[in-house]
Amino acid sequence: MDFGDLSSRSNLLGSNTVYRPTVVSNKRRVPSVRRQNHPSDNSPWTTFFNPWIGRKWNGQHQRLPSQDTPCISACTTATNLSSLGDFQSTNTICNYSRKMHLEENLRMTIPEIQPLQDNKDKEEQYAVPELQQKKPPVPFAHIKTQLITAIAVSWVSMIIGYCSAYTSPASISLERDFNLDSAKLTWITSLMPLGALGGGILGGLLIENLGRKWTILLTDLLFLVAFIVNYFAQNYVYMYVSRIISGVSVGVLSLTLPVYLAETVQPEVRGTLGLLPTAFGNIGILLCYLFGTFYEWQQLALVGVVLSIPFVIVFWVIRETPRFLISRGKEEETQQALQWLRGPNTNIEKEFHELQKSYQEETETDETACESLKVLFSLNNFKLMGIVLGLMAFQQWSGINAVIFYTTKIFKESGSTLDETISTTIVGVVNFISTFIAAIFIDKLGRKVLLYISAVSMVLSLGVLGAYFFLKDATDIDVGFLGFLPLASFIVYVLGFSLGFGPIPWLMMGEILPAKIRGPAASVATGFNWTCTFIVTKIFLLLADEIGFHFTFWIFGAIVFLSLLFTIFFVPETRGQSLADIERKLAGIKVRRMSSVANLKPMPSSF
């Protein structure tokens, strides 16, 4: 509290008093007083000795009663200071034995007011956002069925990984059997992400109308059809059709899985279980690399058929998401799904009511298609869409799918001392293991920290890999003694990608997009992701032929460096927060818990 402002308070010292703030030894601003023409003190002696009087007397104050304890309320202090004039009388003013110095009077009030200042400072610590409260660990019994659900739907993600890596081991036998040139082989490779672009656009409509669960089943059946067509292929046209069908399935599933897991898994384990699709996708890549060491294109397609069958059986065990069920007015089924997901002994009433409230807030206004489009691209939602699209763009322009699709060719061009097939398999193993490392730390370190680690790792590895190809292709230096460097760089690169920019963009897409626009917005984001994938996979070999592998990898490294800056300044942290809390936080709504003691402060009108 600053007592220098007391000069304007005429009720304390009277209208003839002028304040001049001075600094005393304890560095507290204590005002001094110059009395002018006081009726009881206008003698010439006083005027003569006034400059040499060390302490000014205040004749309009009487000493306040001493307090045994300074712990009084703000109202008491304000009353004591504001009612001083009521205790004044002519007798007390003229009675110099009752007079006191103004500085002494203020010192008597400071012990009363100072604790309120201290309390005010202390109570700032009580204004803590509710989101920062530490929550107890969740018992395994409460997440057992959520784990089963996450594993079941992630099995289909394994097919995505298998389908993505298919062309790497199958390309040699495809070129031989179908007499393919590089242009046709490139189209077989890039038609899958092109089909995924269409699937991403279609997926938003499917998950909002068909439901999350049934949409996942549809994608699994599409994979089954695609691999059957692949197995019975007679020429490259069959391969085109197969890759387009599988691409559509990949696009729809890439959109559906994050939304399904975000709406079924509770916040405490959403990060860990949300990484399972990426982990299973990496398992699919590893399986394709392993089988590719001794199988050709047709046998690899048959393995894809076998991988598509188990989910058709498991599908009947898992449940639809509670959020979708309540959007269809199925409250009883919503409660049953919540109870199944959280465990039979878990009280779901609070979560169910929050789900009801959240849905009611979403449906308060019935919007037309044009209004929905305006909501999708409103200022706040446009910002969130920018974050999601930025993460998707940086994920693909890091060059990961070019590496996955052309791993064997890159190792062959590098002149590595290790066989390209063995090197490719090692990369697949590292890619598989790294996802489980991310699953351990994503709910401990958070999303942003893993993105930082991911970006730095990829920048360093791409820089080193580009330097290796520069020394090999642009100079006369013999790089035979550095034959291990391509594999080492790829290991660090894939490890870094799998820790952060691999799984987290898909995970955060299901977290930060508001529920009202989650379907169409996720559809746009997924379509954009696969557009970037198609462009990168289509131009990678063209860039490498025109400017060399070294400049190509350096361009990817520069883009990843920009992704690091983007993460630092724009990406929010969502670890351990419910979807409702994330939505409120990103909408600018802060939930704060204030202590009642913080309201005990001096009344401004009392001074």
Image (cartoon, rainbow, N blue to C red):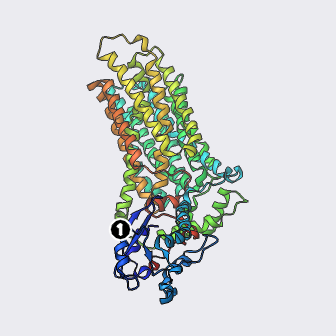
- In the orientation shown, which residue stands out farthest toward the bottom? 90
Against 549, is 434 above or below?
below
- In the orientation shown, which residue stands out farthest toward the right? 345
Where is residue 483? Give x, y as percent.
44, 15
Type of amino acid at the residue the image marks with label 1: Glu
Where is residue 524? Give x, y as percent.
38, 53
Q: In which quarter of the image is residue 435?
A: top right
Against 408, is 451 above or below?
below
Q: Front-most of 566 and 362? A: 566
- In the orientation shown, which residue stands out farthest toward the left? 546
Label 1, on which residue? 371
Decide if residue 249 is in sight here.
Answer: no
Q: In the image, is 125 to the left or to the right of 233?
A: right
Where is residue 305? Give x, y as percent.
55, 38
Against 59, is 595 above or below?
above
Report the label total. Answer: 1
Q: Front-most of 589 and 607? A: 607
Q: Front-most of 30 and 3? A: 30
Decide if residue 490 is in sight here.
Answer: yes
Where is residue 99? Give x, y as percent.
50, 78
- In the orientation shown, which residue stands out farthest toward the front? 45
Q: In which quarter of the image is residue 405?
A: top left
Q: Is mark 1 on a helix, strand or loop?
A: helix
Question: Are there few (<14), some (14-19), or many (20+) residues within 10 Å of tag 1?
Answer: few
- Please report the residue visible at 62 percent of the width from the left and 50 percent of the height from the top: 149
Question: Where, quadrant-wise, is the C terminus in this rendering?
Answer: bottom left
Q: Quadrant of residue 275?
A: top right
